[in-house]
Image (cartoon, rainbow, N blue to C red):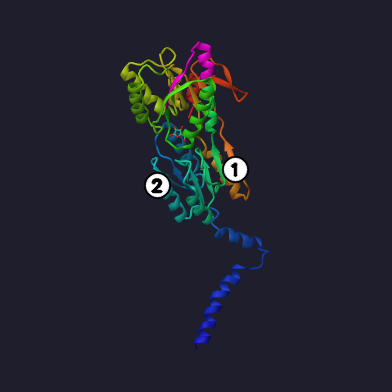
Amino acid sequence: MKNLFALILSLCLVLPLAACSAPSTATSSDSAEASSVDNTSKPISVGFAQVGHESDWRMASTKSAQAVFSAENGYDLKFVDCNQDPSIQMEAVHSFVQQQVDYIVIDPILATGWDEALTECEEAGIPVIVIDRTIDDSDKYVCWVGSNFQTEGLACGEWLKAYTDAKGIAQVNALIIEGTTGASAQLGRSQGFEQIAVQYGWNIVAAQSGRFTQVGGQEVMGALCKSYEGQFNVVICQNDNEAFGAMTAMDTVGLSYGVEGEILLLSFDACTAGLEEVKAGNILADFECNPLAAPFVEQVIQQLQNGETPEKQLFMEEHWYAHDDTVSSFAINGQEQTVTVVDDAIIEAQY
Ligand code: GZL
């Protein structure tokens, strides 16, 4: 009796599978039937582990992703604001794997510590797309879309060299308010600017992290104004929000900055509010970092959906902005760079 039961049970298990492995020459009705069961209208699920909400740049990056990966566009976006906490970001990636999303997008808070998380994604067969900041200790991702941060730092240094030469400023004694320590944006911008400082014999008086925030920029600038009073003539902020904070701190101690001021103030990101300060002459130059990676990420996802292989790296286009045309152009490693003087139309069009 048991043998008969075992036989019936094994037939029940085998028959449906046999039906699934029907002859390969599916007819149109089969394919129609197949398409109605393969949920082609099912939204593409995208897990996005975002750095946080620390800056105007970051908010523009988030808005871009939410606009592109919307339900109307056929996506199910699972968004996690990791609040600049690497442990939250790792947990977010792990949860996306548990949820078996179709794709994972990461803007990595820090450049290292990623191989375990990316290995988990790879083993789960979930493609990872990295945006903006880089992952420097694993290449288990399909594509990276972002900016060359070292080039941004080199641009800042070479522009400053051209500006101080044009103004007859003999020496640069710089304070640097860095971004989040260990973020590739901080590492690259610092490396680029420091390379130029060494080349031209400048003095970097101090460098301290403002964590890419306005509060951080104000706190650090306030402390450095006390510690290095009268010892610096240049302040480099590694994003606009830090520059806004630094301006407040310099106002508090009565230190003038900008085109008419004692202190040359330079910044990165070139967000709308940053360009407004450039036009006003408070920030002399702003080195853009483009936050609108989401449309390029969607192109990568569509390529993957079509079985194509995307490029491993996609660099975003960016510009170097200035208050005026004291420096109309400069070179980075011999490559000519143009400078854009900020006007209302540029501000209107910015992110
Ligand atoms: C740079 C980006 C940085 C911005 C900051 O690509 O990661 O993080 O410069 C942001 O505004 O906080």
- On whether residue 308 falls in the magenta region, the answer is no
Q: Is mark 1 on a helix, strand or loop?
A: loop
Q: Is residue 248 visible?
A: no
Q: Which amino acid does label 1 sit on?
A: Lys
Residue at 50% x, 15% y: name it. Answer: 164
| Residue visible at 52% across and 37% down in the picture | 293
Mark 2 Cβ and ligand 1 under 8 Å apart: no
Q: Is residue 20 above or below residue 119?
A: below
Which residue is tagged 2?
87
Image x and y of residue 338, in percent = 58, 21
Pointer 2: residues within 10 angstroms few (<14), some, or many (20+)?
A: few
**Which residue does the image show at 62% across and 68% down from the upper left?**
21
User: From this viewpoint, which residue is outermost toward the left?
Assistant: 252
Q: Earlier in the sequence, mark 1 or mark 2?
A: 2
Three-letter amino acid code at disc 2?
Ser
Q: Give the range drawn in magenta.
A: 160-176
Quadrant of the rendered image containing residue 234:
top left
Compared to residue 325, the image places residue 17 above or below, namely below
Answer few, some or many: residues within 10 Å of disc 1's Cα (few below 14, many 20 plus, some between 14 and 19).
some
Q: Residue at x 56, y 59 (%)?
A: 36
Mark 1, residue position: 312
Q: Where is residue 61 in the image (x, y as percent from the top left)?
A: 47, 36
Could you say which is closer to the camera, residue 95 or residue 335? 335
Residue 88 at what x, y percent from top left?
39, 46
